[in-house]
Amino acid sequence: MGAGTAAEATVRGAGIFGLSVAWALARRGVRVAVIDPGGPGAGASGGVVGALAPHVPEAWNDKKAFQLDALLMAADWWAEVAAAGGGDPGFARTGRLQPVTDAAALDRAMARGDEAAKLWRGAARWEVIDAPEVWGPVSATGKVIHDTLSARLAPRAACAALAAAVTARGGTIAAGGPDRGPVVHCTGWRGLAELTAARGGTAVPGVKGQAAVLRHDAADQPQIFAGGIHFVPHADGTVAVGSTSERDWTDETATDGQLDAVIAAARAAVPALARAPVIGRWAGVRPRTRSRGPVLGAHPLHPGQFIANGGFKIGFGIAPLVGEAMADLVLDGRTDRIPPGFRPEGAVA
């Protein structure tokens, strides 16, 4: 499809990928219809955590390079979203702290700092510092890793901001409707389940996560990753903590004792939260491909249509580049920004 030939397009799914693709198309002059019975952020994208954090700077590959590019473009991209629709996505590049557990971990952290200096193009730092006294994780060595690349979003607010930006550019968000123009499927774990079933598989390609919101004002502080838990301070005076990774589940939106265990572990890992009240609980199912990366490209089951799905645990972080790369594909037939491992033949569910 050549540039400018699509006056209209349809995006099925109003999660973070669907809305990001819709915005990337809308900002290029396409009138986009976003179709989702649940509305913006109704599924896993309506979560509470919003950690935009890089993988460790070593064993470099296409996935990490794509993620880096997305994180580096995020500030300007989300600022344009906010300006277009008037919504605040809650974006801030506040960095991240991680405890250093022992001498071997300290050596690894120092080596990774040298790698980050090369791989992150001087745009951010990965360094070892003394553990902060007020806001920080318990650290056996008294040291923490501090990276300045990590950022945060408020997931529900980000989805609402994207929806507002799309509609401000003439797009629509609806529960149903016909396909008009090119179609992009961004339908979360159920869309991946369709692919799995078509290929004879039986596994459900969705991983349930549970997370909580605690009342504690650390709005300008870095996020923390400790004990497998993300701690993300938000501008509204809350800290989101999570999440679980449950391959076996029956009720996708129910919270249970597994979340209680996360909350208890969070209080132990970050003493500042020891008495912070829990004011919200959330659960949802996140799409996960076999490769753990996203699936971006021509849809294997719907000839002439497209798919943007997956992005397990990194969906919000890579969404800006997912949107722009898919717009390249839909409007110009370009795939140069989509790594081979992300294409449907390389990242099947």
Image (cartoon, helix red, strand yellow):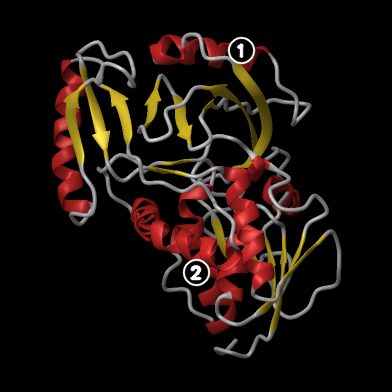
Q: Is residue 122 above or below residue 178?
A: above
**Image point 69% across, 45% down: which residue?**
189
Q: Is residue 280 above or below residue 168?
A: above
Residue placed under numbered mark 1 in the picture: 260
Q: Position of residue 290 (x, y in %)?
A: 55, 44
Disc 1 on helix, strand or loop? helix
Q: Position of residue 13 (x, y in %)?
A: 72, 57
* Occupied quadrant, residue 65: bottom left
Looking at the image, is mark 2 or mark 1 earlier in the sequence?
Answer: 1
Q: Amino acid at mark 2?
A: Glu
The residue lying toward the viewer, choosing from 200 and 246, is 246
Residue 308 visible in the shown view: no
> Is the residue under label 1 in contact with that under label 2 (CB below 8 Å)?
no
Q: Position of residue 288 (x, y in %)?
A: 59, 43
Disc 2 on helix, strand or loop? helix
Left or right of 336 on screen, residue 195: right
Assign the N terminus to one quadrant of the image. Answer: bottom right
Residue placed under numbered mark 2 in the picture: 324
- Report the disc number at residue 46: none
**Image point 56% across, 90% down: which residue?**
2
Structural distance between the alpha carbons of marks 2 and 1: 39 Å
Q: Is residue 259 above or below residue 81?
A: above
Q: Position of residue 69 (x, y in %)?
A: 35, 59
Q: Amino acid at mark 1?
A: Asp
Q: Is residue 79 above or below residue 139?
A: below
Left or right of 279 on screen, residue 113: left
**Image point 14% across, 32% down: which residue?**
110
Residue 164 visible in the shown view: yes
